[in-house]
Amino acid sequence: MAKKSLETIQAQTSAFIAEGDIRPGLGEEIIDSFREQSVDSLEGVSSRSFDMAAAAKAYKTYLKRVGGNRHETIAQIGALLENFKTFQPRVDQLRSEGAQYCKYSRPDYLGSGLHSDVFVVDVDNKEYAIRLPKDEIRPTAINWRIKGSIAAQNVPHMEKVVAASYKDGIVVSERMPGVELFRASAENLRQVTQEQVEDLFDTFSESARLDLVLDPSPHNYFYDTAHGFGIIDYHGRTRPSTHSGNSAQDTAIKNRLLSEALTHFALVISEVGFYHQRPNKTSGYIQSIMDNLFARAEILDKLKSVCANRLNGETKEGVDKSISQYIRGVKAVIRNYESQIELNGSS
């Protein structure tokens, strides 16, 4: 029998931890062993501990039950790990150039999160975002990203992961088109259509159904005039919060997740404009800020309308209340700036 590759064993182990009968804490311990590029986490290991022995036995039973590499989840994870070989030379180049130590002066630097720096690379005339870990390699976090990306692979407007490495702690994804909402201009925002807001609602609804974890940072929402809104930096859960067997309970959880996604997005729209930056108080500058605020208020109005038509019951009431509050907040800031313009004009 041919020896299994590292990628095959990692894919099989990851799928087993997600779908098999194993204690969550032990699953994370096994995934973390990928940092050492271990290929025997559950392959022939039966005496390290009672829990590990039971897990190894359950692992072998799981592989027989699902048909090994023919199982869709195993095949999908394996493909992402195998695809990393395509990007390995670009990762090596970034590291050899010390990209993370001079990132602010590099044109290929896209931004940073809490645990990684992001660089854009071009492979076969297509742009991809490579996340390089800032400090320690965290295989468990990579596993969450892989789990989420597989679940959301057919969901429009969500970041598409194309490759990953447990050992290197790296995720590669297609570059999201457009600009961060944090940096969106009034000209950009005025082009948001009702249809694009409806599409975003559908994306949030599907992410709630799939039990995905969204990071509500303003840097993780994008807008492109042609493609609409985009969402990056989401992941799967260690253990699902839905699928309890109680349909009413699962529906309540999905409604809560959808409500949180909608209200977080509304907060992002209402708060992250460049009106927080105040280098001067000239009338022209203040007017540019107000243009941005008016555009954001229009998006919130569109979102409120969509939610009123698509939600029901307590979820509808709660979301409507939150969005209405954010709309009032934006309009209050607009009135404040209008007063400043009047004062400037009278001085």
Image (cartoon, rainbow, N blue to C red):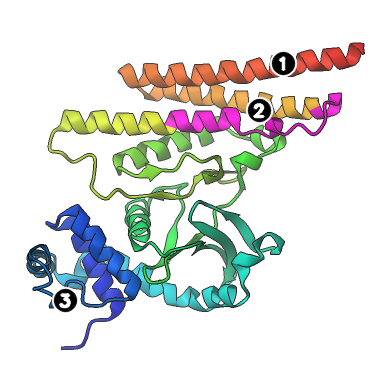
- Please indicate whether residue 96 sits to the left or right of residue 39 in the image: right
Residue 2 location in percent, x, y?
A: 20, 88
The residue at which mark 2 appears reads as 295
Residue 73 position (above or below residue 326)? below
- Please indicate whether residue 90 sits to the left or right of residue 237 in the image: right
Residue 277 position (above or below residue 140)? above
Question: Among all residues in the image, which is located at the extreme front?
Answer: 49
Mark 2, secondary structure of its residue: helix
Tag 2 and tag 3, C-beta contact below 8 Å = no
Sequence-wise, the earlier of marks 2 and 3 is 3
Q: Is residue 28 visible?
A: yes
Report the magenta stretch's main SS.
helix
- Please indicate whether residue 278 sits to the left or right of residue 296 in the image: right
Sequence-wise, the earlier of marks 1 and 2 is 2
Say which mark, if any, is on residue 43: 3
Mark 1 crowd level (few <14, some 14–19, many ≥20, 10 Å Cα): few
Residue 129 position (above or below residue 310)? below
Mark 3, secondary structure of its residue: loop
The residue at which mark 1 appears reads as 336
Please tell me which residue is depicted at 56% across the width and 74% down the height of the picture. Answer: 95
Q: Which image quadrant is residue 8 in?
A: bottom left
Q: Amino acid at mark 1?
A: Asn
Q: Amino acid at mark 2?
A: Ala
Q: Amino acid at mark 3?
A: Glu
Tag 1 and tag 2, C-beta contact below 8 Å = no
Distance between the Cα atoms at labels 1 and 2? 16 Å
Residue 87 location in percent, x, y?
A: 49, 74
